[in-house]
């Protein structure tokens, strides 16, 4: 049975997997959990054995137990960026990567700071009890990714809803009947982005809609993959950053010594964020499809098996990290974690997530003298085996 309590605090489960079953074949399913850093890195290197195509997802069966279904049961999809293999992945990444990273990100800092400032003003209006997740952690990434794509500001509430909704397809906690409704939300997002892409095709701007419109006109992308690319960026950009901003603030709120240390020295924020994203990986893992019979860690995996590579377990693997469950601010290589993936599928938006999170933490610290978790209203996690994000995060805040 899929127990939400395990996924609310999965780390004892991960530890047991690493020690006893580093490659665990889930009984009765063609599903394998991969838990150690060494074996996950091994799988990532073996692109001929492990495909990124998202052919199979986990759902909750009518009996409450996990089940698998093929994504093509919901119609033809696309293999784009995170779900593509070379050579298609190389083409898709080359279309968006220069625009997303090289030119636009640092130039967006003033806009990001303005968005954070506006959302902090909303938080301040709530008084000394602030609901951080839905006031700052979720809206800021939605507004940023909307601006990066080229959507008008009035669209950002829909963008936030779609950005956070997409992860539910991968949550594993929903029945097939519920998945139909979730899929409709994804279809609505795709239709919305199609309309915006067609509008941009007549006069492409310098945003991602313009980049994708030019790529379609040049024959580098077809329309389906352009929409797929924009959908992936919307979901990943919103979900991962919302998770990081929420988790980082919650860690500071529950650890007074850590908060005091970072308040006293803001130069520690960047290294703290690397530890936050390592300790609470926004995506607990990603799926791979086994392309041919092979072995991993001495376990035979049959072609067609779905492998769930658990970044969040690898990132606390004591074989890889000293003091793996602590926020260590002076790690020798602070970015050695797998929270943003690795290799050809390293997240193209990772620098943007870091920038948004750094701005949010620094501006929160500047605007307050203290914050802590609310004693009478505990945080709640999104019910998911895929994302690690707060759906509710109340803070008691002392504003400056």
Image (spheres, helix red, strand yellow):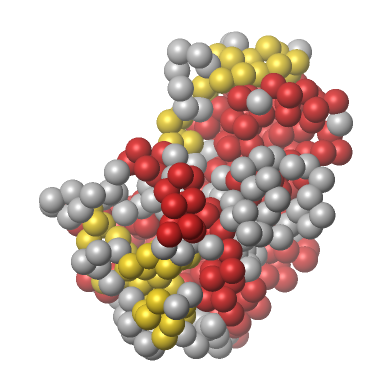
The residue depicted at 43 percent of the width and 59 percent of the height is: 20
- Asked if 218 appears above or below 368 in the picture, the reply is below
- Asked if 294 appears above or below 6 in the picture, the reply is below
The residue depicted at 70 percent of the width and 67 percent of the height is: 99
State whether residue 34 appears in this view: yes
Q: Nearest the camera: 269 or 317?
A: 317
Q: Position of residue 111 (x, y in %)?
A: 73, 43
- Asked if 2 appears above or below 38 in the picture, the reply is above
- Residue 67 location, quadrant: bottom left
Q: Position of residue 156 (x, y in %)?
A: 52, 43
Relative to 243, 293 lies left or right: left
Relative to 308, 226 lies left or right: right
Q: Nearest the camera: 21 or 94?
A: 21
Q: Nearest the camera: 49 or 344?
A: 49
The residue depicted at 70 percent of the width and 35 percent of the height is: 360
Q: Position of residue 56 (x, y in %)?
A: 31, 70
């Amino acid at each position: 049975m899929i127990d939400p309590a395990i996924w609310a605090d999965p780390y004892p489960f991960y530890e047991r997997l690493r020690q006893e079953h580093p490659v665990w074949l889930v009984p009765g399913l063609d599903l394998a959990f991969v838990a150690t850093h060494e074996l996950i890195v091994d799988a990532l290197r073996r692109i001929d054995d492990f495909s990124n195509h998202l052919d199979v997802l986990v759902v909750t069966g009518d009996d409450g137990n996990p089940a698998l279904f093929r994504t093509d049961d919901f119609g033809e999809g696309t293999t784009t960026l995170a779900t593509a293999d070379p050579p298609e992945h190389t083409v898709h990444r080359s279309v968006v990567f220069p625009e997303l990273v090289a030119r636009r990100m640092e130039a967006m800092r003033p806009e990001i700071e303005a968005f954070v400032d506006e959302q902090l003003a909303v938080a301040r209006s709530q008084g000394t009890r602030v609901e951080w997740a839905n006031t700052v952690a979720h809206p800021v990434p939605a507004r940023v990714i909307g601006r990066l794509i080229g959507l008008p500001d009035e669209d950002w509430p829909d963008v936030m809803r779609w950005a956070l909704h997409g992860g539910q397809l991968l949550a594993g906690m929903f029945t097939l009947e519920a998945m139909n409704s979730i899929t409709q939300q994804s279809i609505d997002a795709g239709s919305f982005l199609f309309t915006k892409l067609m509008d941009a095709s007549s006069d492409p701007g310098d945003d991602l809609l313009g980049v994708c419109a030019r790529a379609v006109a040049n024959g580098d992308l077809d329309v389906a993959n352009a929409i797929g690319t924009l959908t992936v960026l919307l979901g990943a950009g919103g979900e991962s950053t919302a998770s990081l901003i929420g988790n980082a603030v919650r860690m500071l709120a529950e650890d007074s010594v850590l908060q005091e240390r970072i308040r006293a020295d803001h130069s520690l924020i960047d290294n703290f964020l690397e530890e936050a994203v390592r300790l609470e990986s926004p995506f607990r893992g990603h799926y791979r499809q086994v392309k041919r019979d092979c072995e991993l860690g001495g376990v035979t995996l049959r072609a067609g098996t779905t492998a769930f590579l658990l970044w969040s377990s690898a990132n606390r693997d004591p074989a890889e990290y000293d003091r793996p469950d602590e926020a260590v601010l002076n790690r020798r290589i602070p970015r050695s974690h797998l929270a943003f993936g690795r290799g050809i599928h390293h997240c193209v938006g990772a620098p943007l997530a870091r920038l948004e999170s750094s701005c949010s933490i620094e501006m929160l610290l500047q605007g307050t003298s203290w914050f802590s978790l609310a004693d009478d209203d505990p945080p709640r996690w999104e019910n998911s085996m895929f994302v690690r994000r707060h759906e509710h995060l109340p803070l008691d805040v002392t504003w400056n």
